[in-house]
Amino acid sequence: MQSPLLTELVNALKILPSVGPKSAQRMAYYLLERNRQGAQKLADVLQESIEKIGHCERCRDLTEDPICHLCSSPSRNANELCVVESPSDVLAIEQSGIYRGLYFVLMGHLSPIDGIGPEEIGLPQLEQRLKEEGVEELILATNPTAEGEATAHYIQQMAQPLGIKVTRLAQGIPLGGELEYIDSGTLGQAFAGRK
Amino acid sequence: MQSPLLTELVNALKILPSVGPKSAQRMAYYLLERNRQGAQKLADVLQESIEKIGHCERCRDLTEDPICHLCSSPSRNANELCVVESPSDVLAIEQSGIYRGLYFVLMGHLSPIDGIGPEEIGLPQLEQRLKEEGVEELILATNPTAEGEATAHYIQQMAQPLGIKVTRLAQGIPLGGELEYIDSGTLGQAFAGRK
């Protein structure tokens, strides 16, 4: 129907999350018809990112440096360590501006069915860090899902013998939420945790 | 906040149509964390497309060949020429399977305010084609918008002295449409064109 190379471009764009055949088609036409400069920029930056962006040696976050700028910042409080599942969680917490400590990014959660065990999410590295560095508080900020809870539980068990204070993000009603629309699980947590 | 290169990648992805900051962020993380192979493929195909894909010399559609495969196909009826605004319109008409003639892609519509005149949408080239090739029917399939109608009117004026039959796509109620939800303009057209 259309040129083979254009079809290939549409297929390559379809791998992007929540981009279907129609959107991919629209993106391909947009890039080639209206914004070749932007397309060139995207191709270049994407190539450079693939080559240079790896994981921070300390926190496993995505970065093009050996140690990311958060880990190497002298203004962060090294006594607090916050464990999250993905780089986007770091971004969300940083945007809230509430936390000044360091991070450890699991890059996933424990999921034995998918072959993801403690090694795959860097827990030996985390344990060594807890032993060697003067971490006073370990904040478990994994997602409030079954896998996230299981992962948090596992890490808690690991940190307890080391005498480190382990905390978990508070659960309850989100700001601006209306009671009638909140699921019963969250409501149950909110009642149980009332103060 | 995050690594400069990652920020650059997010900004480069934001140029894609209907991709905002959150989606771009998600795409960047997805490409780097979960699908580097797909990311590499996208970077390569995008680069190749930018270098190779240009416009067909006959119909102005996007293609990597000098003459696109539709224009060079011997099985198409060269007596019919369908004028559309963009390559995606060609694709939509081809998918319907109803048309076996050739196309002419304007790559836009007349819009004097934006400095888009007859030259910019290839009308001299179209006129020459109408004069030199034995086109018997010119089908105006520009969009049913003010600009599309104006463009169609202009082309009709251009083709009339050449004695070519000029037609326009029928307007009315779309298949499966429900009367109560159809806008009054369309309903008016459907009434006026009843048969």
Image (cartoon, coloured by chain):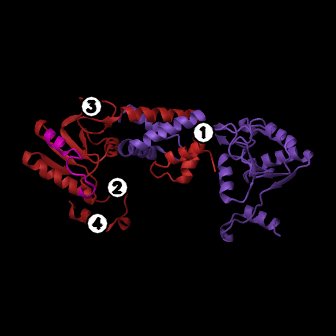
Chain colours: A red, B purple
Image quadrant for the C terminus of chain A? bottom left
Q: Name the residue under label 3.
A: A67
In this view, B81 is above or below A184 = above
Point out residue B31 in the picture as x, y percentages from the top left corner: 41, 43
**Mark 3 belongs to which amino acid?**
Ile
User: Which comes before the other along the chain, label 3 or label 4?
Assistant: 3
Mark 2 belongs to chain:
A
Observer-nearest of A49 and B143 = A49
Q: How many labels does the image show?
A: 4
- Which chain's residue wears label 3? A
Can residue B28 be seen by looking at this rendering?
no
Q: Which amino acid does label 2 sit on?
A: Leu
Contact flag, marks 1 and 2 (Cβ < 8 Å) = no
Q: What residue type is labelled 1?
A: Leu
Q: Which residue was labeled with disc 1? A: A32
Residue B36, by quadrant, is top left
Q: Answer yes or no: is residue A184 visible.
A: yes
| Label 2 sits on residue | A175
Which numbered disc flags the more N-terminal residue, 2 or 4?
2
Which element carries disc 1, helix, strand or loop?
A: helix
For image coordinates 35% across by 45% down, the residue present is: A88
Q: Earlier in the sequence, mark 1 or mark 2?
A: 1
